[in-house]
Image (cartoon, helix red, strand yellow):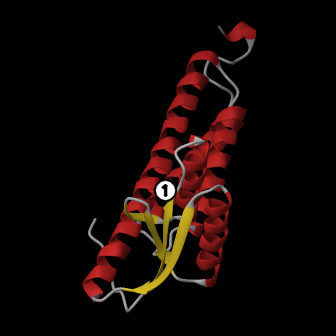
Amino acid sequence: MVTIVNVTATRWILLSSRVPREPSRLRLTIWRRLRRLGAVLLHDAVWVLPAEERTREAFEWLADEIVEQGGTALLWDAESLSPSQDKELVTRFRSEADERYRALAAAAGEALRQATRQRLRAQAPLTQPLRRLRVLERTLRLERRRDWFRAPGWTEAEAAIRTSIQRLESLRDRPPKGAGHALDH
């Protein structure tokens, strides 16, 4: 699916950091926080987000933590010099968000397939698979909050999760095959 990106001049906030090699968990913690924010890696340790009050504050907190842990961090407020660069960045944000949405849709489909197989084979309860789908539903809501440019993949992921939940709930309300009365065998 090709999405036309209409971008007016976008302001960006950039975080450039250098983190000590040890302890390595600091690098992983920083990387996870940046991913959780929906930041895009531009080059080496330069991350970008649209410049808003909450993104600026999040980068400031992260920069402070990096410095406290013995690293260096620089924050930049920027505007690209060409609309094509803005379009390219927005396309990258949407592309990364679409990848995350595809993974959520695939996880929902897999949870439904596994639950259906288990239900047919072992007459297993659907509590765990439904719980897993509810977690995916919450994850989708969190993902939407870090989807800065409204990637189109959200619609498919939301439909996949919703449909999987509905199917499992309908299966839960029906007795499993072969679960009839003992005299019916």
Residue 130 falls left or right of residue 115: right
Q: Residue at x 70, y 27 (%)?
A: 125
Question: Nearest the camera: 50 or 163?
Answer: 50
Question: Nearest the camera: 37 or 143?
Answer: 37
Question: Nearest the camera: 44 or 9?
Answer: 44
| Residue under numbered circle 1 | 157
Give coordinates of residue 117: x percent, y percent. Answer: 53, 25
On-image quarter of the N terminus? bottom left
Q: Is 82 placed above or below 72 here?
A: below
On-image quarter of the C terminus? top right
* Camera sees residue 65: yes
* Camera sees residue 4: no
Q: Is 176 placed above or below 87 here?
A: above
Give coordinates of residue 4: x percent, y percent. Answer: 29, 79
Dot 1 surroundings within 10 Å: few (below 14), some, or many (20 or more)?
many
Give coordinates of residue 31: x percent, y percent. Answer: 53, 53
Question: Nearest the camera: 180 or 44?
Answer: 44
Give coordinates of residue 46: x percent, y percent. Answer: 43, 66
Give residue 128's quadrant in the image: top right
Q: Residue at x 29, y 75 (%)?
A: 88
Q: Residue at x 67, y 40 (%)?
A: 130
Residue 143 falls left or right of residue 2: right
Q: What amino acid type is highlighted by mark number 1?
A: Ala
Q: Is 133 placed above or below 62 here?
A: above
Q: Residue at x 64, y 25 (%)?
A: 176
Give residue 180's quadrant in the image: top right
Q: Tag 1, which secondary structure?
A: helix
